[in-house]
Amino acid sequence: MTSKYRLFSADSHLEISPQRWTHRVPAKYRDRAPRLIKLANGGDAIIVENRPMYVLGLAIAGKPYERHELTGLTYEGSEGAGTPDQRLKEQGQDGIDGEVLFTSAGNLGFWRGIRNDDAYLAIIHAYNEFLAEEYCAANRERLLAMGVIPSASVDAAVKEMEYCRKAGLKGVALNTFPSGKLYPTPDDDRFWAAALDSQMPVTVHVGLQRTDGPLFKYDKEPGEVAFGGDPIRVLTRFGGNSGLNAVQLLLSGVFDRYPKLRLYWAETQSSSKSRVKFCASTFTGDSFTTASAFACATISAWTESCGATTSPIPREIGRIPAVSLMICFLVCPRMRSRRFWSTMLSSFSNCANREPTRRPICAY
């Protein structure tokens, strides 16, 4: 089928004032919602409990380099920060047919500064309601904002995902694992199963929330491994957050339990789809053959259903049958050695009481 889209942004940011949507928060929680304040220099900033002040600056894009400022910017009158009608006009100026829109990169962790779960969940829901009923409603074929999944519990995550689906949003974005924890748990399976059952695309923007705590629920304490520390942290120490998450997911066995599960991972500094296909290699269980690698559930999942933010997104994003996994991570050149990977995988197997998932690996 011929696509109605010619060029579609697979990772745009929705940087808007909280005043646009916080009136939807129930009155009893509204004083805990993100709040816009004015700085002495006239610029905008946002405050929320238990978080440093967010100052509007480089997040406002769509302007020449010489007009970028670290502070002193306002939402009013700025590119990309206005009404949905303004956004549609800007798409025309940019020559694109539409955008997958993620909330401002820091918002998901920023909003979790709200410690009261009832208030936090109400605020997340108010934002999703704004997206569904107001912002995306201006043009659901061109403004594809991802709903926000709360970092609280699997029950809360499933409930909000179901709301987003019924409200007409095209996908949802995670900030932590579905349980709200920073490592995979068996309880997460209820969320993955619900996503597959409802055919709701699941995405991650950049990576799941970074943590200094445990990265995996081991059956046995791993002790110290090569370079000391947690095996997964060592495995991904050069790979950034998305690489760390890749290993967490792959070694948890979630793709063995749900082989049709796919996730779309945006903004990973990844290569193009053609280069991924060109450089495909295989993880044999005792070595990687490349220094820099993409990890994906299957090569076909990558090539048919997803791409990096520098590649075309699925032609009919509103009809993705399931979510698409695309995760990027880097491996230090010395890690090419068979001995290193044998040691790491042996360490994981010993503490997790299972063999690590064997999946195709593609490199760029």
Image (cartoon, rainbow, N blue to C red):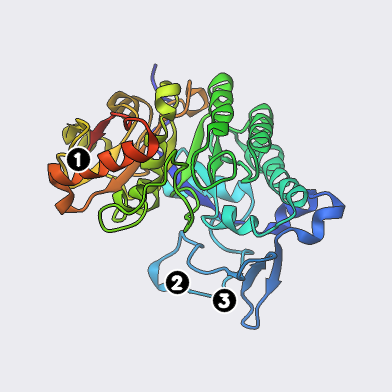
The first of marks 2 and 3 along the sequence is 2
Write down the quadrant of residue 95 in the picture.
Answer: top left
Q: CA distance from mark 2 to mark 3?
A: 11 Å
Residue 67 versus residue 233: which sits nearer the camera? 233
How many numbered circles are shown? 3
Position above or below: 139 against 25:
above
Picture coordinates of residue 289 (x, y %)?
Answer: 14, 39
Picture coordinates of residue 333 (x, y %)?
Answer: 16, 52
Callout 3 secondary element: loop
Callout 1 secondary element: helix
Kindly identify which residue carries mark 1.
Answer: 342
Labels 2, 3: front one:
3
Picture coordinates of residue 347 (x, y %)?
Answer: 29, 43
Residue at point 58%, 32% (across, down): 187
The first of marks 1 and 3 along the sequence is 3
Give the residue furthest to the bottom: 40
The first of marks 2 and 1 along the sequence is 2
Neighbour class for label 2 at 10 Å: few (<14), some, many (≥20)? few
* Horizontal relation, residue 20 to residue 3: left or right: right
Write down the quadrant of residue 328 in the picture.
Answer: top left
Position above or below: 340 against 200:
below
Give the residue furthest to the right: 28
Kindly identify which residue carries mark 2.
Answer: 67
Task: Please give the label number shown on residue 72.
Answer: 3
Residue 364 seen in the current view: no
Residue 158 seen in the current view: yes
Type of the residue with mark 1: Ser
